Amino acid sequence: MPARRPVRTAVVAAAVALLSVTAAACGDAGGLEGAGATPTAVSPARLWPDLRPASSPAYAYDEGSTETVKGVAVPDDDIRKVDPVDVVRAEFAAHPSDYGSKGTYHATVDRMKECAPGGKRARCPLLKAYYRDLTGDGRADMTLGFRLYPTNQTAVRVYTVEKRRLVQVLADNDAILGVELAGRAVIVRSPAGITGYEYRTTWTWDPERRAMVFSRDEFLRTGRGRHSHAPSPSATAGVSPPATPGASPGASSGASPGASSSTSPGGASGGASPSASVR
């Protein structure tokens, strides 16, 4: 968001000028002091006005898709009564090309066995489920995550209930630093290949598509020295291990305002796991 930086500079300059005026007023009867020249506003310049309109869509982002989860019931239409482990296992069954013996994430299936009672919790890939109304219907929706092996990425999923059916309204796999819930949006933070920067991708509920759609992708400055290597499928930086029972609810802190951003008009789980509500 380059436009925000000059604005903040102007605000700081104005604050400094105000302090100067106050200090002068306390010491003598000096007058107002200028804060310097104000840059002239420049309107956007439209390039290539005669360019022929594109005849095909732009490079495809995940513009929002839904999938009914088969084999998982929703007692009393209450998503909190759904076992996240059953949800993830239903995904395994529905996508054998991804989770089968020759699938990219086949090792995740074996690790899910550790999520059952008596399993080694440290090896369970399932993360804590969070509950919050993201669709605006007044009922809680479920956001859950699970680690993907052997890539060590993280899968982020959002589910809602429609006509007694569990419906997945967001599916995103990435190398992840943190995930935040804000209003009806899911914000995913990922490492960048440039030192001191990170990516922030925002998915927002679209009532017409009945899905979480890609709405913003930002490249943000976070300070020096945080990330010095390009992300890879095996990168694990900043990804928290599976939550343990009794962990407090919450989401990771947001990134600082950044260098640039781009927007799109709408366009990208045995044993009960611990859960928490986000307010």
Image (cartoon, rainbow, N blue to C red):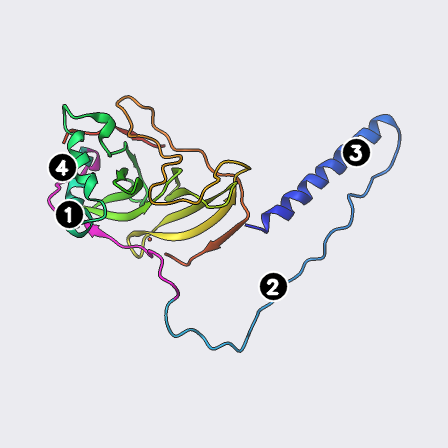
Marked residue nearer the N-terminal end (1 or 4): 4
Q: Nearer the viewer, mark 1 or mark 2?
A: 1
Marked residue nearer the N-terminal end (2 or 3): 3
Residue 100, labelled with which disc? 1
Amino acid type, residue under disc 2 in the picture: Pro
Residue 20, labelled with which disc? 3
Marked residue nearer the N-terminal end (2 or 4): 2
Marked residue nearer the N-terminal end (1 or 3): 3
Amino acid type, residue under disc 1 in the picture: Gly
- Callout 2 crowding tier (Cα within 10 Å): few <14, some 14–19, many ≥20: few
Residue 257 in view, yes or no? yes
Quickly name the residue at label 2: 44
Quickly name the residue at label 4: 75
Secondary element at image label 1: loop
**72 drawn magenta:** yes
Q: Nearer the viewer, mark 1 or mark 4?
A: 1
